[in-house]
Amino acid sequence: MQLPVRDKINMSSLTLKFPKEKKSTMETYWVPGVNHTAQYGRWAFAEFTEVYQIQADFKAKVESEFNQMIQQTVNLASSTSTDSTK
């Protein structure tokens, strides 16, 4: 079963002390950990740093995650139909 996608939108100030560590923690631990439980939907993380590009970058990230979700669903459906014909 495919879980719904959840967005974690977090606005950080430019004075954040450890931006690289925060990004690494989100990508390495938080998102995979939450996704592994499968209790809260499927989460993704994106970092946007260019103020005038945020809208376009956000749109591209959402489209990318959506396309990935569709492709996983298609792959799952095709592997399920292949398995049932054996």
Image (cartoon, rainbow, N blue to C red):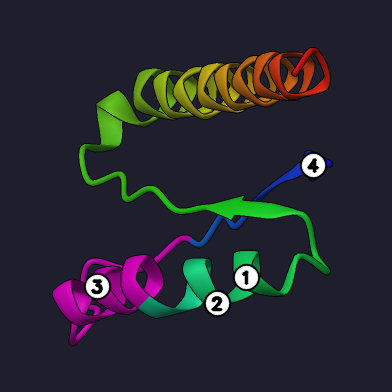
Name the kind of residue labelled 2 in the image. Answer: Gly
Judging by the rendered image, the residue that carries numbered circle 1 is 36
For marks 2 and 4 on the same chain, the one whose residue lies earlier in the sequence = 4
Name the kind of residue labelled 3 in the image. Answer: Ser
Q: Quadrant of the N terminus?
A: top right
Question: Is residue 21 part of the magenta span, yes or no?
Answer: yes
Q: Secondary structure at mark 4?
A: loop
10 Å crowding of disc 2: few (<14), some (14-19), many (20+): few
Mark 1 or 3, which is nearer the eye? 1
Q: Secondary structure at mark 3?
A: helix
Judging by the rendered image, the residue that carries numbered circle 3 is 24
From what the image shows, is residue 18 above or below residue 2? Answer: below
Task: State if disc 1 and disc 4 touch (CB < 8 Å).
Answer: no
For marks 3 and 4 on the same chain, the one whose residue lies earlier in the sequence = 4
Judging by the rendered image, the residue that carries numbered circle 4 is 4
- Marks 3/4: CA distance? 24 Å
Name the kind of residue labelled 1 in the image. Answer: His
Residue 82 percent location from the top left of the image: 70, 15
Q: Secondary structure at mark 1?
A: helix
Residue 51 percent location from the top left of the image: 28, 37
Mark 3 or 4, which is nearer the eye? 4
Q: Which dot marks residue 33?
A: 2
- Marks 1/3: CA distance? 17 Å
The residue at 24%/73% (across/down) is 24
The residue at 79%/12% (across/down) is 85
Task: State if disc 2 and disc 1 touch (CB < 8 Å).
Answer: yes
Nearer to me, 30 or 73: 73
